[in-house]
Every structure is written in structure tokens, then in C-alpha cells.
Image: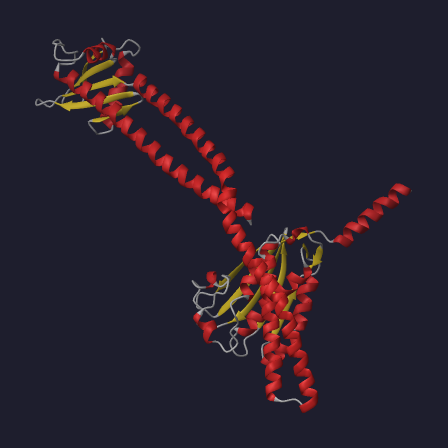
Amino acid sequence: MERRLRIQLTLSVLASLVVLLGVMFLGTYMTRRAQVDADADKSIDTIVEEGGELPKDLSRYSNSKIEGFYEMRYLVTRVASDGTLEETNLDHVATIDEGEAQAMVRCALSRGGDRGYVEKFRYGVRAEKDGTKVVVLLDRARQLEALNASIASELKIYGAGVVAVTVIFLLLSKRIVQPIVRAHESQRQFVIDAGHDLRTPLSIISADADVLAMDVGESEWIDDIKSQVDVMSGLTESLIVLSRASTANERDAGVVNLSDVVAREGRGFKSRTLTEGHPLASDVCDGVYVRGNEQYLQRMVGALIDNALKYSVDGGPIEVRLERHLHQAELSVRNATEGVDPKEVGRWFGRFYQSDRARTHEAGGYGIGLSMVEAVARAHGGKARAEAEADGSSVTMVVTLPTTRDPTQRTRRHETEGGSDER
């Protein structure tokens, strides 16, 4: 549990940090890019106002601005009202010939806007009163490369910061989750100890009821006592299994024939289904093996069938199915229902959760059975979920578990290999 909490907490902090830094990084990039474009647009406007040349009166500009003017690489083209390119001034750009310049101008005009980029040239289009247009293309390659280099450096710094924070938080997370782990462990141990302590008085009450029945004969009151003792015993065992399975990893246990477990539990409920009028149909795939605790798996299957019987409509069928899909075993228990909200079924596996229907149901339990099912499934490396028809006419509880090989086949293969070696 501690390891899972630490990982979840670290991932949450890491995700928040990445989102925050991502927003900051994107905002910084967009601001700087907008500044680069704004500077280019000002220079383009100045060139257009000066008739395609640099300003002759430089006294009103700062020294850095003057140096920037002389470093500019740009071309100017005048376009006739009919779209013909009249003249192109290439005096301030040496690496582009007239054909390339005209192609870039046509590309800028085809885009329709008065500002934009053609490759790494920022262009500006200005319409004159006589119907002609002046197109200026200003080389911004150096500025864009500087911006990208700066952003790349900051990205590396952000990445290093994320790694550093992750490492530091991983080291601190153990101390952060310790109080939660200790509280959970204390609660778990209390439930287990209380469950063991309750077994003794329940056994005494059950034995006393048997003795009383022998002395005075069977009666409604004695049957009531025995029935409630059975209920309390089942509740106690479920609490113990839930507490143990919630922190255990049962995949390291032995190999269990899940097919036998499901078939055996189905037979165990046969008399109850007949008494209560629920047809029980089983479709169990043979030879499905999983690693785990057979006792826990048996209680899990029993809890699923018991839940289906409790909340099935009168005379509704119960369907138990065990299938194998590649390396997964899928156990499903289906029962007919009425008025189930499909949006609610996802909460059924919550500990002590009971829907309104369960609270008013005469066979309502304590909200432990399905949470125990989920805990056992998780302890065996699997998952549990509930599915409901859109009209609420049926509910299916599904448990998936990772499968393992048949141990008897492995033993036979080893014996065959050993015999071959001897020969």
C-alpha cells in the first residue's frame, strides 16, 4: 500500500508540475514570438513609409535601432492593380534572385492577409490609393533561430527541474504517506483482531442455542438466534478477508484451479437457488488456473453468486460464466433486475456502499460483499467491475484475473524431458 500511495502521490505532483510549467512555457513562447513579430511589423511599416529604403534621418532612432536597420535583409516589390509584379528591389538581400523573390511575393499575396510569414520572411502588404500594392519581405531567420535556441535552453532547464522535483518528492513521499499508512494498518489490524475476538462469543451463542434446542425443542426464537449467529459469523469473516486482502499480494501463493472453485461454489448454491425459485445456469471453462489463495477466491465467487441471488427479481435466472481470453480469466455473474441506474453501478464496489434499492431490500446486506470481491481481485492482480443494461433489466458482475499454466502439464513435461535424458 505504501509503495502504491507514494507512486500515486508522486505522479499527481508530477502531472500538476508538468501542466503548470507547460502553461508557463507556452505563455513565454507566445509572448516572445509576438514581440518578434511586432518588431518586424514596425520595421516593415518604416520601410514602406520611406519608399522602400531605410530611413535617411536616423537622428530620431537609438544606436541599437540604427544598427538593426543596417543589419536588415529585406526585399520590396510593387504590384500593379491588375496583379502584375512591376519591380522588385533586391538591393538589401544578396542571396535571393528575382525569380525566387517574385515566387515569395506571389505566395504572400495568395494568402490574402496583410501580415504573415513566407518561410522565415515576415511580409507586409500595403495598398496604395492608386490601386497598387507594396509588398515588403523582411528576413527574420536570425531572430527566429535566437528565439528557438532560447526556448530550447529553457525547456532543458524546465526538464531538469521536473526531474529534480520528482527525485526530491520521491524521497519525501515516504514521510508524507507514513501517517496514512499507519492509520490504515491500525484500522486493518483492529478489524482482524476484533473479528477473531468475535468468533468466540458467536461460537458460544451458537453452542448454547443448540443445547437449548435439545432441552426445550426447536422453536422460532432459537431458529432466529441461529440465523443471526450465521449472519454475524459471515459478516465477521467477510471483514477479516476484506482487511487482509486489501493489503495482500496473493499472486505469490500457490496455483488454484479456478474452474473447480467456480463449479464447486455453483453446486453449493444449487439448493438455495431451487428454494428461492431462481434457475441457476453455469458455463464454466475447464482448466482455468490462477495464482492465489483458494480460500479467498472461493469467498469471492460465493459473494458474487450471493449478491446475484439477493438482488435478482422474483424467479429471475442467475447465470455464472467462466471464460479464458488469452492470458486472462473472466468470471461473470448475471442476474435479472428492475430499475437499476446504469450510472450507479460503478459505485457498487465502494466499501460499505449501499444503493437505495439495497437499503430497502429485505435481503439487504452491509455493503461489504462487493468491496471484498474487488479487494480479492486486486490482491490477485485482477479487476472487478459492474455492467448494467441500458434499461436496467439486468446486471453483470465481472472479475478478470491473470491466468497461469496448468501445473500438471508442467509436471508431465518435466517427467518426459527427464525420461529423454535417461535414454
Expressed as whole percent of the image width and height from the top left, the position of residue 96 reads 29, 12
Expressed as whole percent of the image width and height from the top left, the position of residue 214 reads 70, 88
> Does any portion of residue 320 appear in the rendered image?
no
Q: Give the quarter of the figure containing the C terminus.
A: top right
Name, please, the residue furthest toward the right.
Answer: 423
Colouring rule applied to residues: secondary structure
On screen, residue 31 above or below 49: below
Viewer-proximal residue, 128 or 65?
65
> Does any portion of residue 420 appear in the rendered image?
yes
On screen, residue 269 above or below 2: below
Q: Which residue does the image show at 87% across and 43% down from the upper left?
A: 420
Location of residue 125 (image quadrant):
top left
On screen, residue 48 above or below 9: above
Viewer-proximal residue, 346 or 16?
16
Expressed as whole percent of the image width and height from the top left, the position of residue 14 reads 44, 39
Image position of 65 (left or right of 308): left
